[in-house]
């Protein structure tokens, strides 16, 4: 019997994620999100997702909200820093109460992942005591620890169906390596029941074995997606597309102020009409994509 | 000498940072980043400087870069190591200091990045989220509050939502009682002045007024009663040497101007 090749095409990967699931997104703020796959979920209007936007998330969560995909959101931040202090649709949804927000900070998310990957009921943290977080998020439970009798906050584990991450390279057996910081992707992968990773490039297994210390985890499914993190950066490959981030933010912001025109145009052009990731890249254009270099 | 108020804030803060300290700088926070790099160049060659997720050595960097995004990977050219998220986040209690801001800052140094609620609990105004501040404020050895705007909307008697605890309601010993290892906010730095906290009830107290600012301006722009000391001093403005380093090496693009 032959070892299984885990390379999947985009639509097979998206088929894994169905209404009502809990998914965890990798990357960190404006870097290394599996934006191509996440855009696919938005296009398909997958519903009622619980989304863990770890550890701090960005506009990929914002457009999922806009497309009605998110029921519950676990995140410490939704925004694009200097391009947008916060995601416009996130702000609107929070103010309309149209999504449920599991209030936390980054360390609380990591504690949740820690508990989940260790298979234990909770992981303790100190941050949050004396704040309003336990009131806003009743899942965070203050308790006295049995060893030193100190005040701590218990962060419960969470069942995570699928992790979606983006990395630099992987081989056909799902061994994933990063040309840079994997952020919290390793914890996310270890906490999730299964992991789908989009990569800039698929490499031969021999290339992975050349430096096995660089392998961060083994994904269950690998999707080849060059520029898969766009408009965010992918370390060692391309920087953030600031012009595109600004285009998004402007359109989304106007939409939350009641003027839908630019957002409708954006959504049609970049989310709904491209049938797959390569068609999306065609919309962005070769010139834009290839200008996202370091110097 | 001509300087922008944000330059003064960065220079004043840089004097607080001691050689050898581990300093955390978060996302999209130009004053904090400038203060840290300035301290490193002026008097702190052993300050553990981070740029985004990198620990960097800027000894031979003529100019540091401005960073629009925390995850910008270009500081890798100066990096000695990279932050390991899986371990770093649990060892923030080893951080000597960091900087925090808020959509609200209250009389006892609590801050709010979450939002402002109506009476029924729903959000009238939603903020960006806590990022890492809830934990950092609890565990880092000390920290500084930076406000880019000083007005009664930001400076309130009590935060509508507390996302990072300063001194709670000011009860003496509250942080110890909650077993929070950090000492809490040391100073609050605003465009009008520098504020500390009274030793007993931890209420915000004027420490110094920036040159040209009056006590009236502070009182009019603060939504609570600020404690006023007997002697009001003036904030030392940036020195020529500080400004030179700031403009040539730390903030060459003039982000603070």
Image (spheres, helix red, strand yellow):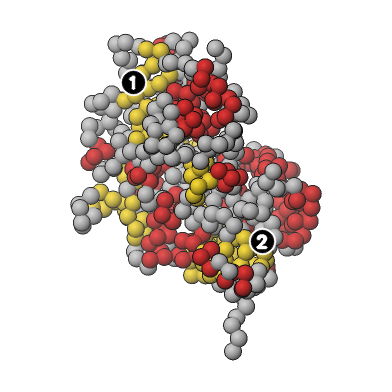
- Answer yes or no: is residue B118 visible: no
The residue tagged with tag 2: helix, strand or loop?
Answer: strand
Q: Quadrant of the C terminus of chain A?
A: top right
Q: Are marks 1 and 2 in contact (CB under 8 Å)?
A: no
Residue B185 x, y percent position in the rendering: 35, 32
Residue A104 x, y percent position in the rendering: 42, 49
Nearer to us in this view, B60 or B132: B60
Chain ID, mark 1: B
The residue tagged with tag 1: helix, strand or loop?
Answer: strand
Residue at the spot 23% in from the left edge and 55% down from the top edge: A145
Q: Residue A193, relative to residue A253: is it above or below?
A: below
Residue at the spot 61% in from the left edge and 73% down from the top edge: A205
Nearer to us in this view, B48 or B226: B48
Q: Which residue is mark 1?
A: B205
Residue at the spot 23% in from the left edge and 53% down from the top edge: A144
Chain ID, mark 2: A
Q: Residue B257, relative to residue A195: is it above or below?
A: above
> Is B250 on the left-hand or right-hand side of B105?
right
- For residue A200, which numbered disc appears in the image? 2
- For residue A172, which numbered disc appears in the image? none
Closer to us: mark 1 or mark 2?
A: 2
Q: For mark 2, does the 10 Å Cα neighbourhood hold few (<14), some (14 to 19), or many (20 or more) residues?
A: many
Residue A8 x, y percent position in the rendering: 65, 72
The residue furthest bottom is A1
Q: Quadrant of the N terminus of chain A?
A: bottom right
């Amino acid at each position: 019997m032959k070892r299984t090749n885990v390379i999947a095409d985009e639509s097979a990967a998206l088929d894994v994620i169905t209404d009502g699931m809990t998914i965890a997104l990798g990357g960190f703020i404006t870097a290394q999100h599996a934006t191509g796959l996440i855009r696919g979920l938005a296009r398909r209007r997958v519903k009622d997702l619980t989304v863990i936007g770890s550890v701090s998330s960005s506009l990929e969560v914002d457009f999922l909200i806009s497309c009605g995909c998110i029921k519950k959101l676990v995140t410490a931040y939704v925004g694009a820093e200097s391009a947008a202090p916060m995601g416009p649709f996130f702000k609107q949804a929070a103010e309309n109460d149209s999504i449920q927000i599991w209030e936390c900070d980054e360390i609380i998310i990591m504690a949740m992942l820690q508990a989940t990957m260790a298979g234990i009921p909770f992981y303790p943290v100190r941050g949050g005591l004396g704040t309003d977080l336990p009131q806003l998020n009743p899942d965070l439970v203050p308790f006295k620890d049995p060893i030193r009798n100190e005040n701590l906050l218990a962060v419960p584990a969470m069942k995570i169906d699928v992790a979606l991450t983006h990395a630099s390279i992987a081989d056909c057996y799902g061994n994933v390596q990063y040309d840079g910081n994997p952020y919290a992707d390793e914890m996310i992968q270890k906490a999730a029941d299964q992991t789908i990773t989009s990569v800039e490039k698929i490499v031969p297994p021999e290339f992975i074995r050349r430096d096995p210390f660089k392998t961060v985890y083994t994904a269950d499914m690998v999707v080849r997606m060059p520029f898969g993190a766009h408009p965010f950066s992918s370390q060692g490959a391309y920087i953030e597309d600031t012009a595109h981030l600004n285009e998004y933010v402007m359109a989304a912001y106007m939409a939350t102020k009641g003027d839908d025109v630019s957002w409708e145009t954006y959504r049609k052009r970049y989310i709904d009409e491209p049938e797959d990731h390569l068609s999306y890249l065609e919309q962005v254009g070769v010139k834009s994509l290839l200008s996202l270099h370091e110097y | 000498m001509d300087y922008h108020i944000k330059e003064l804030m960065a220079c004043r803060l840089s004097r607080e940072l001691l050689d050898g300290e581990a300093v955390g700088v978060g996302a999209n926070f130009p004053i904090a980043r400038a203060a840290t790099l300035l301290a490193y160049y002026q008097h702190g060659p052993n300050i553990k400087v981070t740029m985004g997720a990198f620990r960097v050595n800027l000894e031979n960097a003529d100019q540091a870069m401005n960073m629009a995004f925390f995850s910008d990977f270009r500081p890798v050219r100066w990096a000695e190591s990279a932050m390991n998220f899986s371990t770093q986040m649990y060892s923030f209690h080893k951080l000597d200091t960091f900087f925090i801001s808020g959509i609200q800052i209250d009389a006892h140094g609590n801050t709010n990045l979450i939002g402002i609620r109506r009476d029924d609990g729903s959000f009238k105004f939603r903020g960006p989220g806590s990022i890492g501040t809830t934990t950092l404020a609890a565990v880092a050895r000390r920290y500084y509050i930076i406000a880019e705007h000083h007005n009664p909307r930001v400076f309130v008697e009590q935060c509508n939502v507390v996302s990072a605890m300063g001194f709670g309601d000011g009860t003496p010993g509250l942080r110890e009682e909650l077993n929070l290892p950090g000492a809490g906010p040391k100073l609050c730095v605003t465009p009008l002045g520098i504020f500390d906290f009274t030793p007993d009830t931890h209420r915000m107290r004027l420490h110094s007024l920036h040159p040209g600012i009056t006590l009236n301006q502070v009182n009019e722009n603060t939504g609570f009663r600020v404690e006023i000391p007997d002697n009001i001093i003036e904030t030392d403005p940036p020195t020529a040497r500080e400004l030179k380093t700031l403009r040539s090496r730390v903030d060459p693009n003039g982000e603070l101007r």
